[in-house]
Image: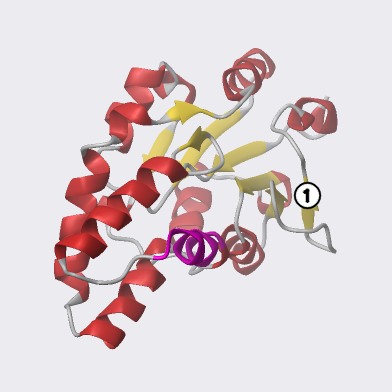
Amino acid sequence: MTKPTFIWDFDGTLVDSYPAILESLEATYQHFQIPFDRVAVENYILEKSTGDLLLDLEKSYGVSFEELKKKQSVEKAARDDSIVLMPRAKEVLEWTKQEGVQNFIYTHKGATTESVLQRLGISDYFTEVITSADGFKRKPHPEAIDFLISTYGLAPQSTVYIGDRYLDMALAKKAGIQSLNLNQPSDSFNRKIEHLEEIISLFS
């Protein structure tokens, strides 16, 4: 079997960070006196993204996207200590190390990503970590994936993006690479997994 290369999403894939994200959004809504419906907001960011949500708030409430993003980023960074690893994530990463599988991260999370990786003890498993601070076009635009493929000479046919949202699956499709997804249904280019440890059996 050809050795794969994994590009990981971060929030909701490698780490359980949605409680912290929702708390940061609630604080942002309160700051700008916007009504907050936790269930509706959670469903929205799972289906689309936090960025899309803030753009919608800009249109609906007249608060600039940049102001919303700045406030939410501050609130989210303040909650980074509450982020924990997804079940079996460390086990899967250790397996990749033993097998010589290269790992990358491409996430919309900002510059504090590295400090979270360090705290969780998984920073050394990744060759490169791309965050929103690097300035690439946002998912599902494939610019960041194209950069990794070009820079590291990755083979698209054996490169896999691992995520948890439709946005992640769409990104993989646009980049011409394989997709594994914790929530999206299997189809011709995506395979749904229930748990991260399935990755080991799929590629062993």
Above or below residue 85? Residue 169 is below
Q: Amino acid at mark 1?
A: Lys
Label 1 neighbourhood size at 10 Å, few (<14), some (14-19), many (20+)?
A: some
Q: Position of residue 167 (x, y in %)?
A: 56, 64
In the shown orientation, is residue 83 left or right of residue 88?
Answer: left
Q: Residue sitting at 42 percent across and 49 percent down?
A: 107
> Taking the image as drawn, is residue 109 in sight?
no
In the shown orientation, is residue 55 left or right of residue 125?
Answer: left
In the image, the segment drawn in magenta is: 37-46
Q: Residue sitting at 25 percent across and 38 percent down?
A: 112
> Taking the image as drawn, is residue 4 in sight?
yes
Q: Is residue 50 magenta?
A: no
Task: Return the residue at label 1.
Answer: 192
Q: Position of residue 14 (x, y in %)?
A: 53, 35
Above or below residue 167? Residue 7 is above
Residue 173 position by quadrant? bottom right
Q: Main secondary structure of the magenta part?
A: helix
Query: Quick one: SS at disc 1?
Result: strand
Above or below residue 195? Residue 184 is below
